[in-house]
Image (spheres, rainbow, N blue to C red):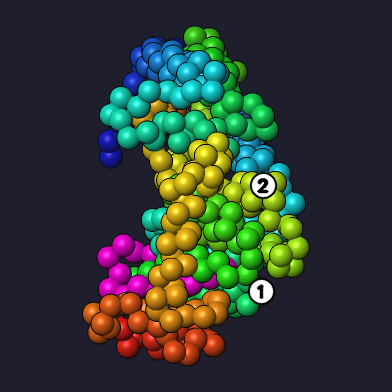
Amino acid sequence: MSSTKPPAEGTLRKVATFAATLGIGVAAYIAIAESDGGAAACLAGGGGCETVAKSSHSELAGISVAAIGIVGYALLLGAALLRGDAARMAGFGISLVGFGFSLYLTILELFVIDAICQWCVASAILMTVLFAVNTIRMLAYVGTEP
Amino acid sequence: MNAEGEREKRHEERLHAEADSEGRERRQRMIKLASATAFLAIAVLLVLIVVSQLSTDGGDTDLEHTAEVRAELLGLDQDGLTLGKPGAPVTLVEFGDLQCPACKTYAESIVPEVIGSKVRSGKTKIEFRNYTIIGEESIPAGAAAIAAGEQSHGWNFVELFYRNQGFERSGYVTDEFLTEVAKGAGVPDIERWNADRNSRRVLAEVSKTRAEAEQLGLNSTPSFAVEGPATDGLEPVESSFSAEELEEAIERAG
């Protein structure tokens, strides 16, 4: 029997810090682009970003989904920077919510809005990375010394 | 000396066992805490999804049957006012008027059966064409459906309109009503839909399909026509009083 050694916690925290910082950048760009009634620029063209931005799904109870994203990524950045079990648990819990909500939004894009926004896809990928990293961190290091 | 060595060894073993036991207990406590965190996270996620659904899919309108229409059309391709696989060998065309009560009956009890049996299987696609014979209000209603179709939600609009239809020519087809239907149907960009439905291009499209229906010799709504490998272009369906008759017409055309 052989067991794979998990990556060092320091490495996991660095990856999470990097992904959360990028996530804040992506969400902030979408929020700023949408703030004056516009939309993020789709680099490959196609107008998907505009369709998604103007969709009723771009807001949640009147709050921009991009703004909610900024808050989520900021909390994940905080969890990545802090040591200890509370940070490990918080990182796992918040990234689980973020990952699930990103999955839900991607399903909406594919089957309800019928348009794909590259920036939303980028955010979904970052949230998937954060969920994976935070899950490994929680499983491998919770209950151990910081 | 030997006895003392034994005692020390036992003492060390006990210390190790206590440390192991403490470590195991700590891990178990943490696993319980992680499970509680996961449970809480999933609960928060579900709340977010429910709030999102309520604030978009008709939850902010007074319309009925939004969820039913969404379920009926879920996963089916839409292109303009055509529902189903683009490569389907047969095309069934419904010439309808959104104000027509008989069309509403068909939309509720006959068309869903055909969608379930022939459209989902990829045998046929269904196209809705406006045949505006009830009154003036049918024209903006038809244009609104075409504009929704340009955002791939045409059938959601048509089906939701029928299910919330008022008395014909009673004046219920207002901008507010049409906007409610478009929102309930999930049309992504309401601003663009508004501009499109009032454009000359879309209004001309409504008149064009009416002329096509008249050329086919149709004189009532809903009327159906079918086109496939075994037909000579678009041919009217002689009898379409049930889903079975429409399914037979599709089989003959294919």
The quadrant the N terminus of chain B occupies is: top left
The region drawn magenta spans B83-97
* Residue under pointer 1: B101
Point out the residue furthest to the left here. Answer: B229
B249 or B71: nearer the viewer: B249
- Circle nearer the N terminus (2, 1): 1
Residue B67 image offset from top left, x and y in percent: 62, 58
Residue at position x 49%, y 52% from top?
Answer: B203
Q: Quadrant of residue B217?
A: bottom left
Residue at position x 40%, y 88% from top?
Answer: B248
B98 horizontally vs A132: left or right: right
Q: Is residue B170 magenta?
A: no
Residue at position x 42%, y 23% from top?
Answer: A40
The kind of residue tagged 1 is Pro
Q: Is residue B87 magenta?
A: yes
Q: Which mark is residue B175?
A: 2
Residue B121 image offset from top left, x and y in percent: 37, 73
What is the CA distance from the residue labelled 2 to the residue labelled 1?
20 Å
Residue B216 visible in the picture: yes
CA neighbours of label 2 inside 10 A, class few (<14), some (14 to 19), many (20+): few
